[in-house]
Amino acid sequence: MSIKRSIWGLHGLAPIWLQRTFALTPFVSLVLLYVIASDYRLEINPQDKLLPSLGQISDSVERLAFNPDPRTGDYILLKDTLSSLSRLGIGIGLASITGLLLGLNIGLIPATRHLLMPFMTFISIVPPLAILPILFITFGVDELAKVMLIFIGTFPLITRDIVLTVRTTPAEQITKALTLGATTTQVIYRIVMPQVLPKLIDTVRLSLGAGWLFLIASEAIASTDGLGYRIFLVRRYLAMDVIIPYVLWITFLGFVIDWLLQQLIAKRFPWYRR
Amino acid sequence: MMNELKTRNLLHLEDVYKSYGDKLVLDDIDLSVAAGEFCTVVGPSGCGKSTLLRIIIGQERATSGTVFIDGKEVGNPDPTRGIVYQRYSLFPHLTVLENVLLGKELAFSYLKRDMAHRQFRDEAMAMLERVRLADHVHKYPHELSGGMQQRVAIAQTLIKRPKIVMMDEPFGALDPGVREDLQLFLLELWEEIGMTVFFVTHDLEEGVFLGTRLIVLSQYYSTEGSKHKHGAKIVADHSLPKNVLSTRVKRAQEFSALLEEVRREGFDPAHLQHIDAFNLKHKDSFATR
């Protein structure tokens, strides 16, 4: 006779179909709850804008995603997505390269550490959104200021994380590399850098959340396109039928980027996390 | 005498002291090791064996004193002194073959590294065959057992042809069976290549079995009138018979007699030798005063 175990306890082990059902439950519940609440409000007031029906939402999606804008001929969702992703990509890309180079040199070379570490700590504490006006004044209201906000908002954290990772390199490894004939530059860029690359990708995955925040904030304030721009534009008309799918789209993009980066780590760095 | 040793011998240390803050760890170490010697260093835990090794390879700096290789003073780590650690000898992001090729590859720029790989692949493969790992060249270190990892580390060190191979408890984390295998394997390599080895271990039996010369480092000794704490000194220096390649000697009578003697000389805090009674009769042994 086998011992019966509850699926709820510490040793609970549900069969696969039940695990899947569990995973779907909160999502399905949320959609159901929305549909019920939306129906209820629309019944009382068909003009209600707060909780549009699924039909209204899909009409808006069709208009923004699959039909060209009658005035400009652009597919608005596509154009917004491309603008936002390129700002995010350039900002985070610059931040990762800067963070990697600074982190390696601060982490490995004591003189660089003494010179830059206190300053980096200071910079990382400055609230990026508070200096957004300075960025707009300095870099204008075009692309540069938005990219700079994402950059300034994310590179200090990436740098500090790389410094911490680099400093966990055992002294033995560095001595070993030197006995194999490595120069200081080689220790930094050929021994330590390849080992922190997957960690950099992990750090970027975490920094993307902040990246989106700064992207949407800057687009909301001064822009002519972009996902954040659109959301804040239609807010004036309480157009929840546009805001809701845009938010879901942004979430989906974030999820896909995170998944892709995770795949990249698994494929390129099989020794990582061992 | 001292200068003659310095020029004649491969490794030479003079008046090496090391202290951490107020705590003196190494107390006036004088040591000279001839080329071709398999020199093992044993001593009770905390006596500073590994510190001594790290000073010789340049990973740490002596508080005072000098290390010479071939009569020339040495400092930071460089390819004259190879090192095999108990852990962290291998680079986790490189395969076995890449780990072994690294010493060759680093002489080239990053862009020419493929060329270096082609040029030295055969040599690296020969080295890996010698350490019996030819079937595992494309694995990463985490896919290998502890004993295999140490064999890769030995190959990685030897391909650079260092003047002296330093080993810091290289077999300390291995199972007893694997450990004996590797001891024999290392002796074979030593005979075959004729390398100089400086081998630190806490395992007295291992030190006596492997070495052609056994250094006992210990903080357990007495000096005139001084009761305050002193650092470790070389308290004994034995010349050992050349090893036969079998672990059977470990059960011989002389072997256990020597173990007993060394244990008394360096490992027993209750038995304090006087500083003038140290057994330093080895031909390369000297002490500055």
Image: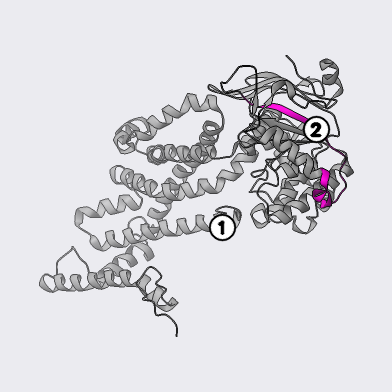
Residue drawn at (18%, 63%) of the image: A50
Judge whether residue B221 is colored magenta: no
Which structural element holds mark 2?
strand
C-alpha distance separating marks 1 and 2: 53 Å
Picture quadrant of residue A65: bottom left
* In front of the other: B99 or B85: B85
Bin the neighbour count of mark 2 within 10 Å (Cα to Cα): few under 14, some 14-19, many 20 and up.
Answer: many
Query: Mark 2 sits on what residue?
Result: B238
Whether residue B15 sits left or right of residue A200 in the image: it is right
In the rendered image, residue B179, in percent from the top left (x then y), is placed at: 73, 51
In the rendered image, residue A118, in percent from the top left (x then y), is placed at: 42, 27
Say which quadrant the N terminus of chain B sits in: top right
- The amino acid sitting under disc 2 is His
Query: Mark 1 sits on what residue?
Result: A266
Residue drawn at (28%, 43%) of the image: A221
In the rendered image, residue B136, in percent from the top left (x then y), is placed at: 74, 57
- The amino acid sitting under disc 1 is Ala
In front of the other: label 1 or label 2? Answer: 2
Q: Is residue B132 above or below residue B285?
A: below
Say which quadrant the C terminus of chain B sits in: top right
Q: Is residue B206 above or below residue A16?
A: above
| Stretch in magenta | B231-254
In the rendered image, residue B270, in percent from the top left (x then y), is placed at: 62, 33
Whether residue B157 sits left or right of residue A228 in the image: it is right
Residue drawn at (54%, 27%) of the image: A110
Bin the neighbour count of mark 1 within 10 Å (Cα to Cα): few under 14, some 14-19, many 20 and up.
Answer: some
Residue drawn at (32%, 59%) of the image: A246
Q: Is residue A244 above or below residue A233?
A: below
